Amino acid sequence: MPRRLRPAILSYDDLRQLATAFLREYHSTGTVPTPIEEIVEFRFRIDIIPVESLQAAHEVDGFISSDLKAIYVDEFVWRQRPGRYHFTLAHEVAHVVLHRGIYQAHRFETIEEWKRFQNEISEEDRRWIEWQAYAFAGLVLAPREPLQDLYRKAIRRAAIAGLSVEQAGEAALSYIAEWISRRLEVSAQVIEKRLRYDGLWPLPEDQA
């Protein structure tokens, strides 16, 4: 029988408020890209431990220990995929902020123990926990005001390059998300989701 954890039900707006408070406390200057590695290591005092072939062997970029003292991350992602690396850190520290009690109530240190924990909980609880961490991470790495400012700049650059946002549709979104992602040091996929969640895409008719 799957174990029920019953995490708090948080809306996207709830998570936005929590992410804003997180940034206010741990990165008050508000500059981007968000220095998530420094926040994790020096503000939360969590060790970041690269693990060879973590993704290849277990299909996971990273996970946090149940005592919340170490984040294990795939070594290749750590070295070669800065956007995914930053998101992995933000995702795992989201569990510290949002799900501390759940994690501390269970014991796991190795990837095998973590996967056993994941398999024991109900699918509904797992979806809630992971969606909350995903959304929180995106909000921390792409804060609302910098994201909106970069979005406006990306729209202008697309127009200068002769790319009609209205006509190009999803191709324009890919161009815009990729341009923003390089400046925020996070993946373009995360930016695309943020633009949709925040109602910035698709463009209103008076802006297209």
Image: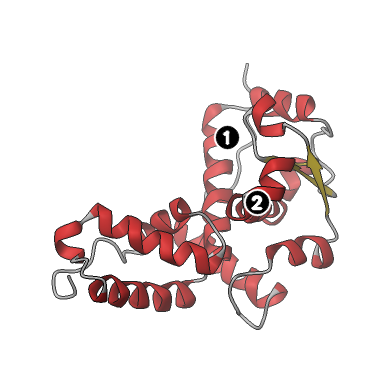
- Secondary structure of the residue carrying tag 2 is helix
- The image quadrant of residue 174 is bottom left
Q: In the image, is residue 146 above or below residue 130?
A: below
Residue 75: x %, y % from top left: 74, 42
- The image quadrant of residue 44 is bottom right
| Amino acid, disc 1 | Arg
Quadrant of the image containing the N terminus: top right
Between residue 159 and residue 61, name the one nearer to us. 159
Q: In the image, is residue 39 above or below residue 108?
A: below
Left or right: 76 as drawn, with respect to 68: left
Quadrant of the image containing the C terminus: bottom left
Between residue 77 and residue 67, name the one nearer to us. 77
Label 1 packing within 10 angstroms: few (<14), some (14-19), many (20+): some
Residue 152: x %, y % from top left: 34, 77
Residue 14: x %, y % from top left: 51, 61
Left or right: 58 as drawn, with respect to 172: right
- The residue at which mark 1 appears reads as 126
Q: State the count of labels.
A: 2
Task: Residue at 14%, 60% (x, y): give it.
Answer: 167
Whether residue 145 is visible: yes
Left or right: 9 as drawn, with respect to 86: left
- The residue at which mark 2 appears reads as 85
Q: In the image, is residue 143 above or below residue 49?
A: below
Whether residue 3 is visible: no
Q: CA distance from mark 2 to mark 1?
A: 22 Å
- Secondary structure of the residue carrying tag 1 is helix
Q: In the image, is residue 192 above or below residue 103?
A: below
- Tell me which numbered mark, 2 or 1, is placed earlier along the sequence: 2
Task: Residue at 14%, 69% (x, y): give it.
Answer: 205
| Amino acid, disc 2 | Tyr
